[in-house]
Amino acid sequence: MAIGVLIRLPVRHEQSDDFRYFLVHWYRFIQQHGGFHALKDTGFSDYNVPYLYVLAALTYLPVSPLTGIKAVSVAFDVLQCFFVFRIVALRHPRPGAWQPFAAALLAMVLPTVATNSGWWAQSDAIYTSFVLGALWFVLRGRSWGACAMLGLALAFKLQAVFVFPFLLVMLLTRQVRWRSLLAVPAVFLALDVPALLLGADPVGLLTVYSRQTDTYPQLTLNAPSLYQFVASPTDPDRLDAVRRAGIVGAGLVVIALIALAVLSRTGRLALRGGAGRPALTPNQVLLTALCSAIAVPFLLPSMHDRYFYVADVLSLVAAFYLPRRLWFAPVLVQAASFASYLPYVRHRPDRDPEAYAWSPFGWHLIAGAMAAALAVVLVTTALEYRKGPAAAGVEPV
């Protein structure tokens, strides 16, 4: 953890465009309107209220907005690494095993993770921490804890829906109990209660994510996705038609992947099993989560460069579960994900905005690396499901 914090110190004073144009203005608005009392009208921000609670709490502390916001993100980097440690420790449980420590260290120093919090002042580690917590609870057989964690993740960022196909597979295969699904909306709505008590509009709170989905019409916003290979129409109507077709196509592909998991040998055994008798192995659970985290943002239009953040971390965990077959998966995912960060990270307002843009061929290579990672993970997942629960187990190191 100390190493992870130290590598962020050189960029602690850097201000990204997101900080200059959004985060600091939200902070100042809250500060000038009475701290938490400012949240009676959340129209100044397009984030859900849990993150605004964090900003409001920071206004009462003797720290600068930049320091406080980055410190919160780094703190969740630490929580994220804690869950990485615990998940890998389930795979390597012997006392003194080096793998959990190595996984936690690597998760803390991944280029995208360090840049996201230390330079960008972004909050993707918050919802990803809770996604990892949900995965850990699933692996421990604790359905309510898993769904509560996913509720927390969704309350902070809409991007938590990228792993909801994973949740559906867990429900259909009885790895997670259906009644525990109530925890997702319960936690989400409970976090709205403080804002409601302050006088916030309930309709505005419940529709914050629906307003976000129409913000960016582009097919891709520097994301290493399928749409790097698709020419963007100049006509707005045609662009909307391509986006709608992409959403429908992504939905059909995700449904097909869910069907393959559920109708596989393991899935059928799980469906026939009795209540409380989950049939999936840890490998199958983890790989299902990783497939969901890569496939959904790769197939959906209008994705941002940061939307593979969960895949960045989960691919690393998967490499420690299946080192012989997936050691290179985090390399591909990280290379594609961090390369998509670079045009934004290297951009400066006083310079040509196109100076650091990748060429179309460069974007094809970057998106191709993510496509290759997705293909490898899909094949590995399919092979794991074919083994069935008796033979799958975990791969020996």
Image (cartoon, grey):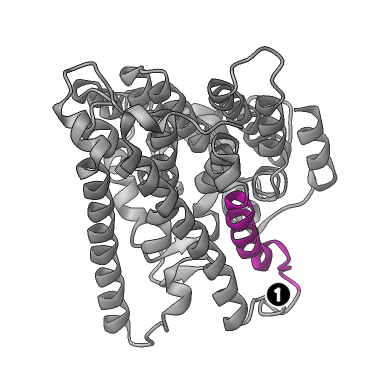
Residue 133 % position (x, y): 47, 26
Residue 349 quadrant: bottom right
Q: Residues within 10 Å of mark 1 (few under 14, many from 20)?
A: some
* Amino acid of disc 1: Tyr
Residue 312 point in image, percent of width and height: 57, 47
Residue sticking out furthest to the top: 95
Where residue 303 sits in the image (x, y, percent)?
44, 61
Question: Going by the image, does 49 lie left or right of 122?
Answer: left
Residue marked by disc 1: 356
For residue 130, say whether it is visible.
yes
Q: Nearer the viewer, residue 358 or 370?
A: 370
Q: Residue at coordinates 37% horizontally, 63% vertically from top-left? A: 299
**Nearest the camera: 3 or 295?**
295
Q: Quadrant of residue 323?
A: top right
341 or 235, nearer to the observer: 341
Which residues fall within the magenta stretch?
A: 328-350
Against 251, residue 394 (above or below) is above
Question: Residue 29 location in percent, x, y?
Answer: 55, 42
Q: Secondary structure at mark 1?
A: loop
- How would you classify the magenta stretch by its main secondary structure? helix
Residue drawn at point x = 25 percent, y = 58 percent? 251
Q: Is residue 102 above or below residue 278?
A: below
338 magenta-colored:
yes
Image check: 321 left or right of 349?
left
Q: Is residue 238 magenta?
A: no
